[in-house]
Image (cartoon, coloured by chain):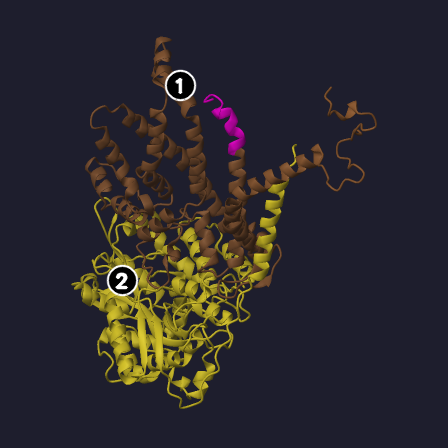
Chain colours: A brown, B yellow
Amino acid sequence: MSATDASARPGLARPRRRPGVTAPGSSTVTPGPAASRRRRTRRHYLTVTSFMAPALLGIAIFLIFPLGVALNSSLHKFGILDAPGTWFGLGNYRYLFQDPFVRTAAWNTLWFVLVMVPAQILTGLGSAMLLSKFRRSSSFYRTVFYLPAMIPTVAGVLAFVYVLKPGVGPVDTLLSKFGIDGPLWFNSPSWSKPSLVLLSMWGIGNTMVIFLAALLDVPLSLYEAASIDGANAWQRFRNVTLPTIAPVVLFISITGIIATLSFFTEAAVAAAAASGQATVGGGASGSFGYPQESTLTYPLYLYQAGFPQNLLGYANALAIVLFLVTLAVIAVLLRRSRAFTEGAS
Amino acid sequence: MKPHPRPTRLAGAAAIAMALLAIAACTPSSHPTKPIASPGSQASGDITFWHFFTDRESAAIQGVVSDFEASHPKIHVTVKDGQDDEKMTQAIAAGGGPDVGLSFSTDIVGKFCQSGAWQDLTPYIKRDKINLSDIPTPVLNYTQYNGKRCTMPFLNDAYGIYYNKTMFAAAGIAAPPKTLDELAADAKALTKFNPDGSIKVAGWDPLFGQYENSASHFAPMVGAKWLTDDGKSAIGTDPAWQQLLTWQKQLVDWYGYAKLTKFEASFGDEFSAQNAFEAGKLAINMDGEWRIASIQADESKVDYGVAPMPVSADRASAYGSGYITGNVIGISRGSKNPEAAWEFIKYLTTNTDAMVKLANGIKNVPTTFSALKSPNLSADPNFKVFLQISSNPATSTTPPSGAGTTYQDDMGAFVDKWQAGKVPNLAAGLTQLDTQINQALAIAG
């Protein structure tokens, strides 16, 4: 005990203070552990919020605000020229479930989701696997396979419609030399959708590049181990390649479904070109769905309802339903994705 | 479940609150129209003019615009061509758009007049004492909606049939058909098949969707009505529609729907030198008066004649009439110089010399009696047929509607199914179509 120790000096023992209790006569507050923790937490949250603010602002401006406006608009009836129109409650939604065009458009869009997305995945993966095998001139072949994806969409569709023109296009001309009577392609209600799927497979460059990168990332040691264990090509693909690239397949599936649910340009341009009708003055929407509404997708009908038919409130209701359906599809896919991707981890 | 941390909840609530506030704040500004000037005032300034024509026709418009500027040196017009109805509608809705807009057809009259997208021209017409009796009644009717005149007629398009004289002579047919029965008989007589049974030349392609074949253009052949007086669909209750569709389907079945579809797929584009009529694939084709100029410009060798559309046998007195649709012109609600805009519209739509120059250049039909009688109007005998169709009192057009092209689009989808044989009961199908159209009209703004 030192001479300065207060306890060594009789009468001068310092009273013990409980934490957080102010000593009588003392003017300063000593914060307790709980208050310090709260201050630290507040500072932490403030820091986090500051970093998140730009993203939150972007989401608010570009997602929440337009969504709010669309929802509000769907509860009114109006045209583009007399917004915001009059209150209509759920009238647009009631009509949506009676409108036969919605059934046709929804079915066509579902058809594209079920057929075009798998076709694109298979074509992209197949061509990537082929390209990954090339040793010599691989850059040349990659460029050639990727080129169609670089062609502007409208120009590509117009070229495709010409190539598949019944009777006079190059494809039908070639088929006729083999005695085959080619189908009517974009002019046939039965073949118009498959023709659009063929078009999408032709322009598969972006998907192919993503798959190629994923394939080249599969560790060679896994293949070697599988070969040593006696696995054949199919078994190596199923047990090594597929589980490893599963997250990429999931990503392509989700983005493909989102893109197909918004399928617009190719269907619109193909219908206008194949119909051969003049669209001068009235706009191209007069030929949407040609032939016989077989290529009328949900987004095309949404556009038609909103603009030429001047039913913008109804078009907003269609848009809200499309948004909810897309959310639901993605949610289901993500839930199911765990089972699909756990092999990758 | 762990509760969301507070900052995320706060951020979410803030975003939603902001959105709600933004929505509440987003009320469109009103568009007060400027009071019109007193009589005799001189308009001046710059105006913009949008139209849908391109190439050769756009050059013809520019010629008349230059004449206007020469006679009105204080007004300068900036012209933008290739602007269709959809672009113009979107521009006006966004608060912009041209001072003067020219629309392709009467389909926009309903929504533009109802919404005020184009200004009411009645004050200008009254002030300047425009003589509306110089305009044919059908034309006057399609340029207004519910008593509001927001457009003036620019030029109009009249439809008739073009027939290949060489093919007619080879088939021993002396004159173009006047009735639907004659049309069907001539179509069969003029059709030629390839050895494999496919169509080589069709006397007449009856399929809806081919070039200008549409329910709108066929309706005047039987006097079919689209809307009742109270604006509801009349398709299911007017027997003329059943008459027309039954006649059409019988001819489709004669050819074979699949054969016709395959034949059509080989047609060139409508506005190209490979147009099926110009290329000799069709002996008779329904088309507008503009085809005369196209045949000249394409240097087609087809030896053709023009006649009014045939009519049903019970309406023989209506022969000579047909379908017309008009280009219409108006002043956008956001125009900064409506007086100069009106001066320009008045020139284009009431000045006989200007209208005749436009009609001769574009080969469209003028819309005033003065211009129709002008000695300077093209003396082409084929063009004269369209002038007569246009001024025939029985000639009709599609009525304007606040729901734009809804009823025509719905009918188009129906006839597509009908001619493909997918409608088992026509009467029931048309009644259901009425219900569908009326539901769509009910949700229009």
- Which of the pair B426/B95 is nearer the observer? B95
SS label for mark 1: helix
Which residue appears farthest toward the bottom when viewing the image? B40
Identify which residue is drawn at 47% across, 22% down.
A345
Q: Hey, what amino acid is under mark 2?
A: Ile
Look at the image and give the residue range highlighted in magenta: A333-345
Vertical side of B419 occupied by A211: above or below? above
Could you say which disc has been placed on residue B284 in the image?
2
Coordinates of residue B115 in the picture (x, y in percent): 50, 69
Could you say which disc has been placed on residue B127 in the image?
none
Coordinates of residue A21 in the picture (x, y in percent): 78, 35
**Discs 2 and 1 share one subunit:** no
Identify which residue is drawn at 44% across, 70% down.
B109
Residue B63: in sight, yes or no? yes
Q: Hey, what amino acid is under mark 1?
A: Val
Which residue appears farthest toward the right when viewing the image? A11
